[in-house]
């Protein structure tokens, strides 16, 4: 191979290597991340795209004694520079104020109890009540009411006393207005704090037909409201009577149950409402 040909091939090789280096620099250079690595837009809170159940008629949870959440009950905690001290007991708690609600943005996230937030369950958040606490919530604007299980902390907006799950907001008619004036009354299992107000549980059924039949029979015997509620934990249908005011009326209904062969109902105690 002559000298000129060797020189020509060498120059072409150098040029090829330079071009490869330039292309490599174009691929790896720059600081802009791929589109897939861009930060996602923060999701706005709101209702689900589709509601799978009739939330307005969702059965209330059945209040029952539960151990306090070790995760959700510190002596105090601080949010946005403000410190909140937890109540030692829910007994006697009753308050009137604004309710709000939270939905899709928090669905599936851990609540203050350590449980996952399920916006389709009748739950709520409160700043200082023990976790868990069951409470009656009454919408003072439309008269609707529901029992909720408090398992989260909030709301941290000034003037609001309870943050409802989406399901509770629908049942109480708060989901369209965003907020509403409500009265919140804690349900206590302390006999000394019951104030003589009771709820009776007359039976529990795996099939709705059995609960409906017992409900119809009891309605013909008592003046108090009789409801069928389904608990999310075991999905049993429970027949509940009440509220029953006073020990004398409680004794009368228990005696009536014995006379009618309906067995001995379970007694659940309620705090005095203060109204």
Image (cartoon, rainbow, N blue to C red):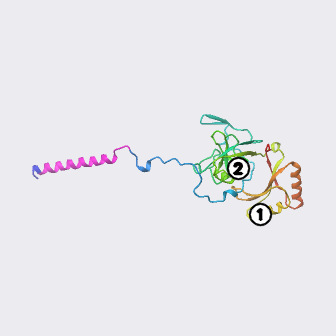
Instruction: Compute the Cα span from label 2 to label 1.
Output: 23 Å
Q: Position of residue 45 (x, y in %)?
A: 57, 49
User: Looking at the image, which residue is at 49% across and 48% down?
Assistant: 41
User: Looking at the image, which residue is at 43% across and 50% down?
Assistant: 36
* Quarter assignment of residue 83: top right
State whether residue 259 is above or below residue 3: below
**Magenta includes 229?**
no
* Quarter assignment of residue 253: bottom right
- Most common secondary structure along the magenta stretch: helix
Q: Badge 2, how many Cα within 10 Å: few under 14, some, many 20+?
A: many
Q: Position of residue 66 (x, y in %)?
A: 73, 47
Q: Are marks 2 and 1 in contact (CB under 8 Å)?
A: no
**Magenta includes 6?**
yes
Residue assigned mark 1: 212
Quadrant containing the C terminus is top right
Residue assigned mark 2: 148
Q: Give the range drawn in magenta.
A: 5-31
Q: Where is residue 122 in the image (x, y as percent from the top left)?
A: 68, 52
State whether residue 29 is above or below residue 241: above
Q: Badge 1, how many Cα within 10 Å: few under 14, some, many 20+?
A: some
User: Looking at the image, which residue is at 67% across and 45% down?
Assistant: 99
SS state under label 1: helix
- Looking at this view, is 80 or 205 the one in front? 80
Position of residue 193 in the picture relative to residue 83 (left or right): right
């Amino acid at each position: 191979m002559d000298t000129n040909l060797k020189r020509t091939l060498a120059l072409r090789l150098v040029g090829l290597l330079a071009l490869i280096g330039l292309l490599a620099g174009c691929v790896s250079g720059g600081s802009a991340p791929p589109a897939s690595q861009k930060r996602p837009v923060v999701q706005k809170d709101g209702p689900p795209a589709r509601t799978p159940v009739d939330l307005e008629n969702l059965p209330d949870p059945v209040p029952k004694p539960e151990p306090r959440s070790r995760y959700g009950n510190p002596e105090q905690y601080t949010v946005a520079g403000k410190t909140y001290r937890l109540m030692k007991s829910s007994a006697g708690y009753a308050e009137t104020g604004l309710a709000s609600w939270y939905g899709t943005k928090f669905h599936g996230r851990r609540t203050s109890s350590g449980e996952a937030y399920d916006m389709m369950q009748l739950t709520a958040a409160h700043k200082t009540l023990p976790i868990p606490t069951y409470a009656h919530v009454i919408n003072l604007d439309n008269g609707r009411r529901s029992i909720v299980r408090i398992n989260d902390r909030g709301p941290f907006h000034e003037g609001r006393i309870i943050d409802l799950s989406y399901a509770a907001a629908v049942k109480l008619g708060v989901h369209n207005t965003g907020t509403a004036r409500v009265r919140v009354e804690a349900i206590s299992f302390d006999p000394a704090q019951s104030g003589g107000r009771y709820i009776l549980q007359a039976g529990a059924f795996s099939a709705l037909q059995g609960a409906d039949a017992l409900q119809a029979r009891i309605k013909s015997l008592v003046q108090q409201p009789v409801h069928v509620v389904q608990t999310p934990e075991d999905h049993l249908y429970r027949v509940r009577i009440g509220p029953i005011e006073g020990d004398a009326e409680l004794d009368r209904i228990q005696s009536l149950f014995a006379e009618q062969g309906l067995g001995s109902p379970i007694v659940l105690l309620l705090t005095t409402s203060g109204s």
